[in-house]
Image (cartoon, rainbow, N blue to C red):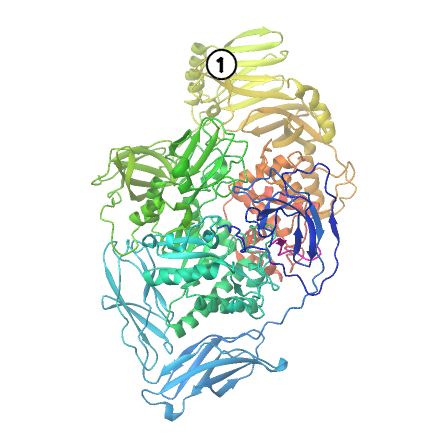
Amino acid sequence: MFAKPTVLSLCLALLISLLYVPAAINAADEPPGQDPAAPQNLRIVDLSHNMATFEWDFIGNDQDPQHPNDIDIWDADTNSYLTWGNRWTHALGGLTPETTYRIYITWYERPATLAHKSNVLEFTTTADMSEYKEAPLTPPQNFKVSDITETGITFGWTTSPQATGYDLYMDGDWKAGVWNGTDNAMTYTIPEEKRVAGASLSFYLGAQDPANARVSANSNEIDLIWGELAAPSDLQVVTANRDTVNLGWAPVPGATLYTVYQGGTVIGTTSEPRLTASGLAEGQSYDFTVRAANQLWESPISETLSAVPGAEYTNVTYYTAWSLSEQGRNFRPEDVDYNNFTHINYAFADLCWKKFGSGATACQNENIPLQSDYVHDGEVILGDADFDPRNFASFKTIKEENPHLKLLVSVGGWSWSNNFSPVAATELTRRAFANSAVNFIREYGLDGLDIDWEYPVEGGEEDNAHSPEDNVNFTLLMKTIREAFDAAGSEDGRYYLLTIASGQGDNFVVNADLKNSSVYLDYINIMTYDYSGNWELFAHHNAPLYHDGSHPMDYAARNNVSGGAVGHLNGGVPAEKLVLGIPFYGKGWAGCSDGGQYGTCTTIPSGTWEAGVFDVADLENNYAGKNGYVKHWNAASKTAYLWNEENGTFITYNDETSMKYNASFVKSLNLAGVMSWEVSGDRNRTLQNQLAHDLPLDGTANEEALPAPAGLAIAGKGSSHAQLKWNAVDGADGYEIFVNRKYIDATEGTSFNLEGLSASTSYSVYVLAVSKDGESIGEVSPASVITVTTDAPVSYVPPAPPAKDKNELDGSVSKQNGKLTISVQEYLALNTIKGNASAAFKITADAAADSVEVLLPKAVAEAIADKGEDAGLTIIWGGVAYAIPASALQHGADIRITLAPPAGDAAGNIEEDAKAAGIRLLAEPIDFIIAAKKDDGQYEEITDFDGSLLKRSFTLDGADADGNRLIGVLYLPESGQFRPVATTATENEDGTITVELTRDGNSIYTVAATGFEFEDVAMDWARDAIELATASLLIAGKSETRFGAADAITRAEFVSMVTRALGILPSQGEHVFGDVDPGSAFAGDIAAAAAAGLIAGKTSDVFHPDRAITRQDMAVVLGRALSLSGLVGSADPARLDRFGDRDAIAGYARDAAAWLAQLGILRGVSETAFSPTTNVTRAQATVAVIRMLESLK
């Protein structure tokens, strides 16, 4: 989610530190000719360690409603939005002490514009001289009965940080204690007069730290009546899908066990106040009850809860604080249709850290009951002191009118996740957070808490704190909150909910340790949207449900809603706890051409409230079908889009039909339901009405819903095809087929042939039914799923070698201006091929020709291919052999093969570029191009050989070449670079050397020799690897005589070395990260590495190319390189056990580090130290890359 600014929510308190230290303030003189339409004379008023207060030349006076002086504040170096202000609130908070900042302001407009900027204001914050109060000793947590006998009770609890003793109180009087500092249990003998039926007993526990004269507040209370247990209360459906119901209830004081009944039959026992009932039938009503017990007593049965799997879906929507603003969204809590939702997540509460929230607002506020005194680090605070109390008051009435509704507060969000990492880092701050969360939900009458940490370990805003241990601490934080909620629930008779908002990527699954942390969570809202946005000019869909094969980017196969959901399920999230994210907004671009979709545009248009972002209701009311905006449908991704031919604007969004397919997907994967951001964007209620219809939430099944196609089966299959069949669905007008979550086709029949499959490969095939409402989709069924595994290929035995020269193809030869053209004669060539036992054929060209052109008829290419998978054609010219596999010639057309020296600027530059690279060319460079003939008679270069490897063999004079220093290269004339090609060198008996280059594409090829002699490469452990790497052009020295072995290698240089090692060519003109100079030497390699999935950057726009790479980050890149190269393996965590600092390895890097240690690629800086955050030297990096290549042999 992303937080929006309001008049008071993010900003802008005028409090400054009481201990003020003058700081450097560099307010430049007003530049001559300053834009008169911009705010004038921006200047500093006051400055502290974490806040800058400023002003400008105000317009009008403070009683003038026409001139409120509303402004937006921007980062002058990145042009990124910071916050909002006006005449009364004009400060920037949450700053870092002793740090220089540069800002400018613009007048507040929506959508925001940078057309008129003020002068730039530069300032440096002071040192932090504030006093921070020590956190109080935390009370024992989750105080409960663990055992009970006829004479006594054993209590258990979670200990308090820094406490060394615990005191037990009964009925307000001290009774016993333990003081050894480690005990978390105590048995107390109940006085005889209290051990009578009906006697009341009340217990609580306190912690003490005698050395520092500190005592804690009391734990939760346990109120008992001897001989009795209360019946479990607040029994509820926490989540449900088509065959599962997750139950929760208020913990019962004194209970140690709960028995859950389904229709009077026991289905399970548990010590926790929750249980999953599984194996249920969709659409059938079930009655559930719970009984509490301990070793002596048993409670009455709870009230009965009825639940219907498939009709109890979770439907969450976010309501934002700033929606209340009359100058903004002006959407009140009363405007929501609560019949469409089960849960409201109120966005957002904030975290206190060093006396301030994430913005400029001080935590302590005498007008807020929970914040009237000193607020300690980690405590939950209001996000907006004005809107929040008013909204909570409205929701109190709304909840009374809608008893089914659950109201949670969401903490964090995009803008307020700055301090989650330090809060989660210690048990002290985790307790502070959890205990304050309990106070918060009690104070404001809430049902639970939603954690929106964006993001642990990596990502989010630039100023967010991160730690490699965030993934471990994430689970500990969830555990701490869950214990606090259960303890509070035992006092309040409530079951309190704990949920999170999850990032869509697989990295979040690891970084939030979802496999383990999900145990403590009631459900997980996955933010399956923002796959595109205003940070890029490439126009593609915001929330594509499935992979569209027309999407040109490699990441498209994973970056879609289905990819995010399946990634979470594969990562260990139970399906009945996963809630699918739905955006109530679209994304737009302007200056597009050719329909806009999957094109590069020039600008971001104004949106509803934010540039490039459009509320769905706004699109429905003001765009679709109006002013040239024509609506289209992408059947593959299940998204709608608008295209305006006149102004070149493309807008993608999810419409009513998209919701039908999203609901089908939820049912197909058996998920818990949906979550939407955010409700005011759908004020026409189009999307929410459809979701509530297709995913019933009140226990009433949708009788109109189409069932999934039954009887899905394989009717026949081979090595490259499969035929499917299924039973007809009543009411269906057609069926859609998906393979590996990619849309394939639609049919009106009940069978389908899948073609073009790979042999011995398994495919997941979905078939769903659809009905039509005129030309529109009426209903969409859940999918039936089947796994199809194709047959093995037919074995091929190569023929015996042919007689010499019997495999030469005949052709007519012509020569003009030095170019030799060989036109293969179809009739003669076919006779040669069909009458020859060989599968290998050749054409020999006159070595005296300046260039060669071979024209190959389509029938000849097909006849060669018919000789078997090892068939091919070799062209021999001037001592160079070009071996082309038949598969590279199969394009359903006549083929032209051209061999020629480089033309144009490349011919003149190649020698100079070789000299600059420190290499010597040993063979004449040859530009090799294969083209196919089009219908218009023209030839078009073939760029995709579908993995077919072409071989070029150069024969060199051995006296002029050292076989150990030879490398085949391809030359990139656009950048003047030489890139290594897979090369083998063979010494012949006559003293010549045959050098064979293998690669899958056209280009300019030659053979080069390297002659580096480095004086700083004396170490035995690295010398051979450095010589091999430099000879192979994987990395260059700092100079002709210095490699720079001990120098730290930068992230950019290391990524370049890995891409060269893998044979990945640079992406010319691509610009992925904002901090990578497009003109820099490594920009193309970084872009190519990002496209291949080798790197992800520190954030979506930041790579830090010039920083040194650490050992753990190197491990991640090398691990991805191994996977990309097809090496399959699993990490053995035990491989890291010998390293004393293994726990210092970041969670995102541990699997890679273990795998590389297992393969012997990374061996630690010593026998007992891995040193994960140490910078890598050029020598170390080179050795690691060479070891990686050796492991791939």
Q: Position of residue 706 (x, y in %)?
A: 25, 44
Please give the count of numbered marks on the rendered protein. Answer: 1
**Residue 94 in magenta stretch:** yes
For residue 790, what is the image quadrant?
top left
Of residues 176 and 1013, which is closer to you in this image? 176
Of residues 263 and 907, which is closer to you in this image? 263
The stretch of residues the image draws in magenta is: 89-99
Of residues 955 and 1162, which is closer to you in this image? 1162
Q: Position of residue 1130 (x, y in %)?
A: 50, 51
The kind of residue on which mark 1 rests is Gln
- Residue beneath the point at 27% across and 73% down: 301
- Main SS of the magenta part reads loop
Left/right placement of residue 839 relative to residue 66 reads left
Decide: is 252 above or below 940.
below
Left/right placement of residue 944 relative to residue 664 reads right
Residue 276 in sight here: no
Q: Position of residue 167 (x, y in %)?
A: 51, 83
Give the residue at mark 1: 938
Residue 878 in sight here: yes
Q: Quadrant of the C terminus?
A: top right
Of residues 188 and 1005, which is closer to you in this image? 188
Pointer 1 local density, CA inside 10 Å: few below 14, some 14–19, many at least 20: few
**Residue 402 in magenta stretch:** no
Left/right placement of residue 473 relative to residue 867 reads right
Outermost residue, left direction? 730
Decide: is 968 above or below 348.
above
Decide: is 643 above or below 205.
above
Could you tell me which secondary element the residue under label 1 belongs to? Answer: loop
Decide: is 483 above or below 887.
below
For residue 1017, what is the image quadrant?
top right
